[in-house]
Amino acid sequence: MICPAGRERMGPLEGLRVLEIEGLGPAPFCGMMLADMGATVISVTRPSKADGNDGDRPASERGKASIAIDIKTSEGVEILLSLADGCDALIEGFRPGVAERLGFGPEICHERNPRLVYGRMTGWGQTGPLAGAAGHDINYIALSGALHAMGRAGERPVPPLNLVGDFGGGGMMLAFGVMCALWEVARSGQGQVVDAAMTDGSAALMGMIYDMRRRGRWADERGTNLLDGGAPFYDTYKTRDGRHVAIGAIEPQFYALLLEKTGLQEELGARQSSSDWPAMRRALARVFRQKTRDEWCEIMEGTDVCFAPVLAMDEAPAHPHNVARGTFLTQERGAAPAPAPAPKLSRTRPEVAFPARAAGADTRDLLRELGYGQAERDALYASGVVAG
């Protein structure tokens, strides 16, 4: 499929064809990751979104073709199945059983396309006593043990945005599972179902922390450990101008450099036990309040202190390191500031092929590609089965 911009796609997944049933959050994020890496991703949206009044399209729709189909009609389901016949993978984020009731569950799809990888994104998974319940990121990471570990000592757990469940434990795990299954298809010739649950994914992300706890190196009381803000040399500090800096001086040599740069060698000396952490924190907080964030950048940035300024989202795209690496797409490159495709590859360079398309922008072309004649297309539009 040719990009709307008129040029062929680039990236390591060029030639891969993915059908995505548009939803919210993690499944579209998975589709975006695949599209960023060169896959042709066809996003199926509702006809009501193609009325021209849906405003800005989500950034997760970038690089995708868009077809508007009413998948609650038999004609719409047949179009969807015809699209899936020519795809390598399908991804959806419905509750368990919904796709089956609508008529495009894995069994039906595999009867028509045995090589299809069927990716399913849910919070609780396809099985288990909670599988049919509603939920959000905060609930899934609560069940996996991740949320309990996040927050200050003596205080309630703090949600880490919706990064751990929706995106890290959800969309990225789905993308990984889909690619694993696609690799296996090359050997077996048989597709399979990828059951990606945010409870499972966020638990997997906690693997190191669970292992530290097993070895007696992690306490159940949040905010008292090495990596949860308990250690004063792995924390954030307020500066004179009300901004903040982040310190991660875990290793002894990095901690020694931190003391040198802050002038606290005599007051704090060598690494101390956790019983001395409160005094250490007070000393570091006092010193960091004496200079602005940018003054501390002049002193520490680029050294082995393990230091970084805490940047707001309107600051991060302009930081020289991010600019040098192209970490963000900027206005100069044809898009509002937004994270660029990641990770970077040395030869098959991923990129955003084109911005998010209007809902249903590719409906006519895709119907034509499926072999629907003009009269059939006109009838589908007139009945409201498709739009765009």
Image (cartoon, rainbow, N blue to C red):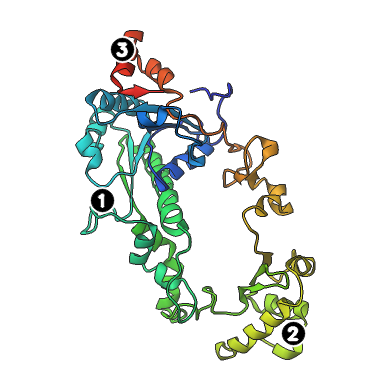
The reply, left or right, for residue 339 in relation to residue 258 is: left
Asked if disc 2 and disc 1 are in contact, CB closer than 8 Å, the reply is no
Q: In this rendering, is residue 84 above or below 149? A: above
According to the image, label 3 marks what residue?
376
Give the residue at mark 1.
Answer: 126
In this picture, residue 333 sits left or right of residue 184:
right
Question: In the displayed structure, does residue 22 sit left or right of residue 268?
Answer: left
Tell me which label, 2 or 1, sits earlier in the chain: 1
Tell me the mark number nearer the camera, choosing from 3 and 1.
3
Q: Amino acid at mark 1?
A: Gln
Number of other residues with Cα within 10 Å of mark 3, as a class: few under 14, some 14 to 19, many 20 or more: few
- Quadrant occupied by the C terminus: top left
Q: CA distance from mark 3 to mark 2?
A: 78 Å
Q: Residue at x 59, y 86 (%)?
A: 277
Q: Nearer the viewer, mark 3 or mark 2?
A: 3
Q: Secondary structure at mark 1?
A: loop
> Nearer the N terminus, badge 3 or badge 1?
1
Where in the figure is residue 198, as x and y percent of width and height? 36, 56
User: Which sits earlier in the primary sequence, circle 3 or circle 2?
Assistant: 2
Q: Which residue is mark 2?
A: 264
